[in-house]
Amino acid sequence: MRNISEVQIPRGRELQQNGTKKSWDFMRTHDSVSVLIFNTTSHCFILVKQFRPAVYMCEWEKHTPQSPEDKVKEGEEKEESEESHGDPPTAAAGVTYELCAGLVDKPDLSLEEIARQEILEECGYDVPVSKLRKITSYRSGVGVTGSKQTMFYAEVSDDNCVGEGGGEPQEGELIEVVKVPLQESMNFAFDESLPKTMGVLFSFMWFHSNMAPKYKISTNV
Ligand SMILES: Nc1nc(=O)c2ncn([C@@H]3O[C@H](COP(=O)(O)OP(=O)(O)O[C@H]4O[C@H](CO)[C@@H](O)[C@H](O)[C@H]4O)[C@@H](O)[C@H]3O)c2[nH]1
Ligand SMILES: [Mg+2]
């Protein structure tokens, strides 16, 4: 009988599961919060758009078969041609649509307080903590990081808008705030030409099943 939970507690990078020795790399990261923001004045979702180096590198590697790490390794057989396939992708290939989100890196603040700060810094809306509603939490990555993300819902109005958002420039953040009209949100969510996170897809679906009736929106999911 196989029991997937029968794992000898790992020592170093090795573990034994079901009699098989395995080693695995992991990366320790902070947990995070994300927020689905809905503007009740304009009936729009408020998303952020930012350049993600990791996303860009995935696209870059498709264009250039040889990865930067491989370049520095010497004496290895190259399976694929080193020839470049035209110009490298533009920076736009690394820009994704995302929920407003942030790392849980301030131990003295609650998850709600961190979410509130991110909404203000990234999107420019001042929302009291009491207006934040927890949707759920989940593992945001199970292959390498295993960290947990807690997702919130925040209803805002134009009256809550106190700034432009855009992130904290001194922390190197460069964020564009994007409005997605509710009526267009499902087409937006499933348009694969617009790169986005799973959180955007999931939260839009959540809104359509839980909040849309309140706004008398017919769902085409
Ligand atoms: N934004 C977002 N939307 C999702 O739908 C979404 N779904 C998953 N995630 C994951 O959540 C984590 C935290 O999100 P952020 O990267 O937005 O965290 P911040 O604290 O705002 O910013 C930090 O990272 C910035 C960029 O590197 C720096 O400039 C800052 O200095 C630095 O503090 C990341 O692991 C991300 O993968 C999403 N993140
Ligand atoms: Mg962020």
Image (cartoon, grey):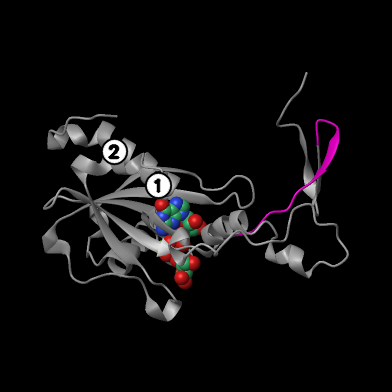
Q: Is residue 214 left or right of residue 102?
A: left
- Determine if the C-beta at disc 1 is less than 8 A from ligand 1: no
Please give the residue where the numbered disc 1 appears in the rendered image.
193
Q: Is residue 72 left or right of residue 135?
A: right
Q: Amino acid at mark 2?
A: Met
Specify the label residue 148 is tagged with: none
The quadrant of the image that shows the N terminus is top right
52 and 130: which is toward the camera: 52
83 and 56: which is toward the camera: 83
Please give the residue where the numbered disc 2 appears in the rendered image.
186
Overall secondary structure of the magenta section: loop
Q: For residue 156, which quarter of the picture?
A: bottom left
Q: Which residues are magenta?
A: 17-29
Query: Does residue 214 appear in this view?
Result: yes
86 and 221: which is toward the camera: 86
Q: Is residue 172 left or right of residue 153?
A: right
Residue 200: within the magenta?
A: no
The quadrant of the image that shows the C terminus is top left
Q: Amino acid at mark 1?
A: Ser
Q: Secondary structure at mark 2?
A: helix
- Which one is earlier in the sequence, the residue at label 1 or at label 2? 2
Residue drawn at the location 22% of the way across and 65% of the way down:
126
Residue 26: within the magenta?
A: yes
Of badges 1 and 2, the one in the foreground is 1
Residue 10: percent from left, percent from top:
78, 47
Residue drawn at the location 41% of the way across and 81% of the way down:
170
Q: Is residue 167 above or below residue 179?
A: below
Q: Secondary structure at mark 1?
A: loop
